[in-house]
Amino acid sequence: MPVVELSYSRLQKLLGKISKKQIFDSLPFLGLDIESEDNDLIRAEYSPNRPDYSTDFGIVIGLQGLLGIKTGAIKLNIKKSNDYAIHVEPTVTKIRPFITGIIAKNGRIDDNIIKQLMAMQEDLHFGIGRKRKKSSIGIHDLDKISFPLTYTTTKRDHAFIPLNSDKKLTVSEILECTDVGRDYGSILGNSSQVPLIFDSKKQTVSFPPIINAAITTVTTKTKNLFVEVTGVNKSDIEDMLSIVATILQTAGFTLVSTKISGAKNSSPKFELKKLVIDSDLINQILGLTLNNSKIISSLKKSRLDATLKGKNIICSVPSHRFDIFGPMDLVEEVVLGYGIQNLEPILSPSQTLGQINPVSLQLKSVSQIMIGLGFTEALNSSLTSKRILYDMTNRESNEIISVLDSKSQEHTILRDSILPGLLENLSKNIHISYPQKLFETGTVFFQADPIGEKTNFAGVSSHRDATFTEIKSILQSALNQGFGLPIETKTFSYPIFEEGRAASILFNDKSIGIIGEISSKTIENYKIRVPVVGFEISLSGLIFD
Amino acid sequence: MSQVFHEIEKKIITSLKDNQKQTPENLEKSTNLSPDQIRRGIEWLKLKGLAIVNESQTINISLGKNGLESFHKGLPERRLLDLLKNESKKLQDLQNDLGSVFGPAIGLARKNNWVDTSEDKIVLKNYPSEFLGEKTLKQIGENKIPKNEINLNDLSSILKRPDFIIEDVIKIKEISLTENAKLIEMTPGSSGAIDVESKVPDVIVARIHPLKDTIDEIREIFVTLGFTEIIGSMTQPSFWNFDALFTPQDHPARELQDTFYLDGLSAKKIGTLEQIRKISESHKKSWRYYWDINEARKMVLRTHTTCVTIKHLAENKPDEARVFSLGRVFRNEKVSYKHLVEFNQIEGVVIGKNSTLRDLMGIQKEFYRRIGITKIKFWPTFFPYTEPSFQTMVYNDRLGKWVELFGMGIFRPEVTKPLGITKPVLAWGGGIERIAMIKYELDDVREFYNNNLSWLRGVKKCQ
């Protein structure tokens, strides 16, 4: 989950007379998980569906609602202007077809605001921008740009001075030599043409979605901003822009519109989305009997607008709340505005009778029998390693099922057998008193179409006098007395067992598993100093399907 | 109440009552017991706090070969000076006279300025009135003398000389009765009684795994709350793990770095044609992207048990039901004290026309009450497939803070509608290890899978 860094003093400046405690107590009810608190600073995780919470301005909007300071939807006040035109050329259609933008004037830009805008940009790029693939933002110093702009494409030998550089680089050089180029260059594929924004003086403004030009860098001297968003889908870039616009307006900027045309592009409208919701649905889901005015005031506390029309409530959702799809999302907004803490849990009698799955019951019986026989239950990961499964036990590894890109070397392969894990357990306990007797039941995997799973049961006994007879009588007694399954053993050889001291286990002449004395080589590999005997059988098809 | 004593103990106590301090050797004689019986008896009585074993040591001193020689012939330095008393002598002659003791004697004489060398002769300068160590030699003679009777200063001058002094360390054990033991009346009879108060060895107790214990307990609670257990595969097509749960194909959670994909494995059959069509439509409409069926076919290790639940609901479409699913789930994480790649999750769903969010909260509250957690609260959160979504926070007394436990919510219409589920589905669940960690007061979740026998054998069974 993304993290936002907040400051009590900044929040208090924006909220007015609100105590630290009120802020601390309210943040979780916006869905923020407070990670740490250090004097003035709070680090909080926010949900990826609320990118508007990536700055404290967005969080202030939410807190104002919850605390009743300001309620209802935020209205974007955008001054109409024809001064800021962007023309789109059709060449972009194949590579990154859409652009939108907004002008933000007369804001106070200090280090802190720059830091917050950068953090917001990062989070938006990563989350809803899908690592800039779907949409990406450029924030520029408006006064360094001469409108109208052209959004077009250029060849890879086009050169300009990119952000954080002091010399001209070609597009190819940027893609090869800069971190952002290497990280995001793949979005552009192998196309010979790349997207570019020029201004009226033919000066490069931005090379989306990679990097801005150095000339438009925002500093604490910047007064006015130009924000552009480019991407593959018109709705997505407008969603992203609406978040930036809402945050900039809350930060004190005056918004001015851009005029966008060409190649199916048009100016953003920031329209409110109208949704109809039935109060019955709300009450039925929440288990409450809220009247319409309570529902409306709750929605307003969640910073939405709502009016009554007949029996229905018409809800107006501001454009930056694109996480709201339909009525169920509004139910959540109602309950957040109403306050979860005000919902009294109720325990209604169940209309159904519960039942444990027969497989679980059978596995529990196996456990009980084995504990009666003096075996302690072990639990191992089913995602394990080649070392444990095959190398240490000399088992054949021709049907490995592995996972891609595991972060842990100890967890790369799905187990096809439980026994090797139990031997690994014994090797970790050689300093503990003997006898050591372990068993485990669990899932093992095998290649099928595409993959099969079955439940196996394995046991080991390890002490000075451990013998084949001991382990055979354990298994025989467990299966016969526990489940009425008489077994027989037939000489066989397996790499995990000592030659001549291994057998396959038969029930009704069908092989259900293996049993024997663990080979001296494996015992040596594990540096175990006493004999080990063990078995493994498949329970699937034996005591359950 | 009178204590029961072994015959050996009785004999020792009786003997010590007569003769209050005895060595084990004395006891052997006075009781007619073997040395081993005496040793064991003393050990038992000591453990019971009835006997005191006082161990002391004395050192006896006698003379070694060189010491005896000096005792008989005089110290080498005296013999040297005696030879020089009348006339100075050549070094060679002295050497011949004194043999091997000449070296140490001349060294000592020079050091003490008793002799001088003039040309090739040794000349006597001083003849001391006494030689240190001589008194001791005389005192010991051919006897053994306790060290504490000897003048240590005089002894020290010859102690280091080779083979002069032999020290014998003699350990003495003396056994006596404690005041309590002296009061013991030895009664005849009760010969069939055994010592029921003595210590006995531990035996190894075979145990169910502590985590399994918690899992069983949680399973029982779900069943008594009216839920029926369903089980499903750990390996799933992405379709059921993600697509059916409204998680878009470009969602970060679906990347390799969060989810385990099975190398090269794709499912041919993932669902009915209608299910596939409707889910892909729901994705296209809501997330505006190209939905790729091949992505949905890719096999993953399930990241939650919700895939089992949703598949069950899609296949059975009940109007009224409580079911739960419990089992291993997988996340591609770095293993640490708080993260495992594989852990257990439980998830329950309630379907019914009168199921409300407050009912869901009530079931949770009751569940937590039954596992012994009473301080809980609900906070909003986000899951891609539920709306509204809450999480429960429970107060951990040991850590002194609120910790996040189960998540809950109502399945989004985007999840239920394409699968033909018409009634609201309340869902809740979370990781079981987290609860087990609270119960077993663990700070490191890896302990559950270490199979450390001393922990498995010794951990307290929690209530």
Image: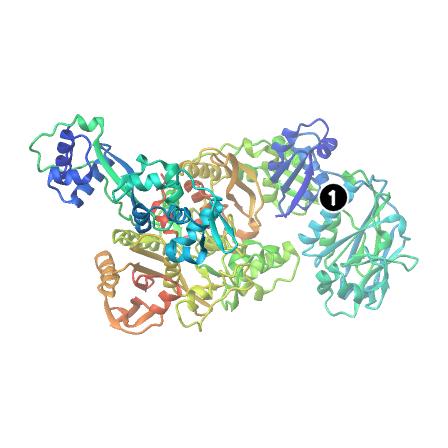
Q: Amino acid at mark 1?
A: Gln
**Residue at the spot x=60%, y=37% of the render?**
A28
Residue A318 image offset from top left, x and y in percent: 71, 42
Asked if B333 appears above or below B360 in the picture, the reply is below
Task: Tell which of B324 and A43 is nearer to you.
Answer: A43
Expressed as whole percent of the image width and height from the top left, the position of residue A331 reads 59, 40
Front one among A185 and A533: A533
Residue A414 appears in the picture as rendered: yes
Residue under circle 1? A116
- For this view, does B104 lie left or right of residue A74? left
Category of crowding for the residue at label 1, using alpha-carbon neighbours closer than 10 angstroms: few (below 14), some (14–19), many (at least 20):
some
The correct choice, above or below, for B218 with respect to B5 in the image is: below
Counting labels gives 1
Rendered-image quadrant of the N terminus of chain B: top left
The answer to whether B269 appears left or right of B131 in the picture is right
Residue found at the far left of this picture? B189
As drawn, the residue found furthest toward the right would be A201
- Horizontal side, residue A406 vs residue A101: left or right: left
* The C terminus of chain B - image quarter: top left
Along the viewing direction, whichever of B126 and A100 lies nearer the viewer: B126
- The residue marked by circle 1 belongs to what chain? A
Q: Is residue B448 visible?
A: no
Instruction: Give the image location of residue A280, x and y in percent.
Output: 55, 38
Q: Position of residue B54 (x, y in %)?
A: 26, 35
A231 in relation to B167, above or below? below
Q: Residue at x 9, y 29 (%)?
A: B187
Give the quarter of the image for residue B231: bottom left
